[in-house]
Image (cartoon, grey):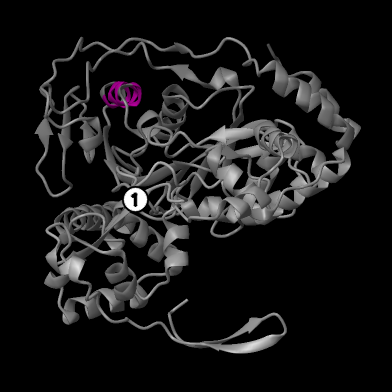
């Protein structure tokens, strides 16, 4: 993985694998005369820098991304003769980055500089050329391919919570540990239906073609940082991103020092989707289950955590549900005169007009100042993540039959400094703040090119009904220029008047799962309202 020499194995014999080396440069006369290729402009020192960066700074996955970003695939523009059937299906253009410039080079120069073979290169860029005879040997029968697609499409899925605006991927419910685990379940299903299972490689390719992924919707790494590491964005863009990240972290640490008897500083986030029932039975793999949501607000000074728990039969995950939880939390702490709330920038959850109107209504009626602050995208680690981590550990290898058992686990997940507080809420808890039109808009600008809602880094709601914002945490507060619709607050109505109906297919699946549940829990699933 580091390009060093190692002892490999071929069949039953051990062989020595040589270390990766930068090979000699391209000396072809055609490259020297070509006006499109810049092989001669890159000296040996620059080639050495590229080679050391490729094998010394990047891991194996990043090397693949790096190679793909420097190779352009296009259709063949000219074929020499129509009589001869060529195996060449695409044209490849290779580039090397030198002093911030992408210089086109021949393929030999590209491969020799990076120290990789053509086989790996063609495989990584997705244009590995194979003979017609070999293609015929690996061709998959239509019946087997159709069964594989049917297997994958029938698995229950959930949309990405953290990236739904930027990703169309569908995520399998969090039941499978890896692709290998999923493939093993596929082979068992094939055996039960008398179908010859396809290989792991064909399975993985089909999985990607269907735009599916295992349930990892919360981004572990920052897209901007990964793109810079792979050489796909300019240093100036990445440096600006890092400044914003460091400003947000420094601001959060500064706010923690401000916490006292009159100022409450908290962070909040929604835990990854919980499913019910949660069992080890294989019957759950192919059935839709009830979604359970846990929204956590964490006091960064006292380390107290309040968890709001509900399932999809009682409420959804719109801005009104989260606004109801946040306002309830603020109202249960009447001794404080100022609140500072930290969160990520999830639009429908933390940065929207519904929540802003709810907080402005609270600030004006209770005469309390409320400030919302947002962390930089891709770097949203917060103290409330530790609560979710503790809960996940307690749930490991534990069966959950009904949502109320999640409540029991959360209450007993921590003992010091004090147990987590839990509010197991139903449909009557949620309020409809969408009709509270005190504020018209939270967009800082009004014209094309002006800052948008996504550029907000902080919003402050004052007791006199005014609102202020920051585009950088280091900026001074600026007043919103959008006029308010009215200064008087309106009363809010209940969001729901009855439990929410779940989909008919999900209710059918939950009924079918009762045979793996103790009979004591059957009445809960029978009572669920459905379409």
Asked if residue 525 shows in the view, the reply is yes
Residue at position x 86%, y 45% in the image: 191
The residue carrying mark 1 is: 91
Place of residue 3 in the rendered image (x, y in percent of width and height, measured from the top left): 43, 80
Please report the residue visible at 12 percent of the width from the left and 70 percent of the height from the top: 41
Q: Is residue 509 above or below residue 74?
A: above
Q: Is residue 318 left or right of residue 222?
A: right
Give residue 106's quadrant in the image.
bottom left
The residue at 42%/25% (across/down) is 319
Q: Is residue 524 visible?
A: no
Left or right: residue 481 compared with residue 263: left
Whether 269 is drawn above or below 322: the answer is: below
Mark 1, secondary structure of its residue: strand
Name the spot of residue 393 as percent of width and height, x first. Answer: 63, 57
Residue 29 vs residue 415, the one in the foreground:
29
For disc 1, the neighbor class at 10 Å (few under 14, some 14 to 19, many from 20) is: few
Main SS type for the magenta part?
helix
At 30% from the left edge and 21% from the top edge, which residue is drawn? 357
Which segment did they paint magenta?
Answer: 354-363
Please tell me in which quadrant of the rendered image residue 238 appears.
bottom left
Nearest the viewer among 366 and 217 is: 217
Instruction: Give the percent coordinates (x, y) of residue 104.
Output: 20, 60
Residue 26 place in picture, x, y as percent: 24, 74
Quick check: 288 left or right of 109? right
Q: Nearer the viewer, residue 136 or 252?
A: 136
Side of 301 where 236 appears, left or right: left
């Amino acid at each position: 993985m580091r390009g060093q020499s190692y002892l490999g194995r071929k069949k039953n014999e051990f062989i020595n694998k040589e270390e990766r080396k930068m090979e000699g440069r391209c000396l072809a006369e055609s490259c020297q005369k070509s006006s499109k290729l810049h092989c001669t402009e890159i000296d040996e020192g620059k080639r050495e820098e590229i080679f050391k960066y490729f094998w010394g700074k990047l891991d194996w996955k990043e090397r693949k991304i790096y190679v793909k970003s420097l190779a352009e695939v296009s259709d063949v523009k000219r074929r020499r003769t129509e009589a001869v059937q060529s195996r060449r299906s695409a044209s490849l253009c290779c580039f090397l980055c030198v002093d911030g410039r992408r210089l086109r080079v021949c393929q030999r120069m590209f491969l020799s500089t990076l120290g990789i073979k053509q086989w790996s290169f063609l495989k990584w860029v997705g244009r590995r050329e194979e003979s017609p005879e070999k293609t015929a040997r690996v061709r998959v029968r239509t019946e087997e391919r159709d069964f594989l697609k049917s297997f994958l499409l029938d698995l229950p899925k959930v949309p990405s919570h953290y990236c739904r605006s930027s990703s169309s991927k569908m995520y399998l419910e969090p039941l499978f540990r890896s692709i290998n685990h999923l493939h093993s379940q596929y082979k068992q299903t094939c055996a039960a239906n008398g179908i010859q299972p396809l290989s792991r490689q064909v399975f993985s390719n089909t999985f990607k073609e269907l735009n599916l992924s295992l349930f990892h919707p919360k981004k572990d790494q920052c897209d901007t940082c990964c793109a810079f590491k792979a050489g796909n964005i300019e240093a100036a863009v990445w440096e600006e991103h890092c400044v914003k990240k460091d400003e947000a972290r420094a601001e959060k640490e500064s706010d923690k020092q401000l916490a006292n008897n009159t100022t409450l500083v908290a962070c909040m986030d929604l835990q990854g989707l919980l499913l019910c029932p949660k069992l080890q039975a294989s019957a759950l793999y192919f059935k839709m289950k009830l979604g359970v949501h846990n929204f956590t607000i964490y006091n960064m000074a006292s380390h107290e955590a309040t968890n709001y728990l509900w399932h999809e039969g009682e409420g959804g995950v719109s801005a009104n549900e989260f606004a109801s939880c946040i306002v309830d939390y603020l109202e249960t702490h009447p001794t404080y005169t100022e609140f500072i709330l930290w969160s990520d920038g999830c639009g429908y959850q933390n940065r929207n007009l519904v929540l802003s109107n709810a907080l402005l209504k609270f600030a004006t009626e209770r005469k309390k100042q409320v400030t919302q602050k947002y962390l930089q995208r891709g770097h949203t680690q917060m103290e409330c993540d530790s609560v979710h981590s503790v809960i996940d550990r307690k749930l490991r290898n534990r069966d959950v039959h009904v949502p109320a058992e999640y409540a029991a686990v959360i209450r007993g997940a921590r003992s010091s400094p004090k147990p987590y507080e839990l509010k197991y809420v139903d449909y009557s808890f949620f309020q409809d703040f969408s009709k509270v039109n005190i504020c018209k808009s939270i967009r800082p600008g009004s014209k094309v090119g002006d800052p948008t809602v996504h550029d907000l880094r902080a919003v402050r709601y004052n007791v006199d009904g005014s609102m202020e914002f920051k585009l950088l945490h280091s900026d001074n507060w600026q007043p919103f220029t959008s006029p308010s619709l009215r200064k008087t607050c309106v009363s809010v109505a209940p969001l729901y008047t009855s439990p929410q109906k779940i989909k008919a297919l999900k209710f059918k699946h939950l009924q079918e799962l009762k045979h793996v549940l103790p009979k004591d829990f059957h009445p809960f699933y029978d009572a669920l309202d459905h379409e």
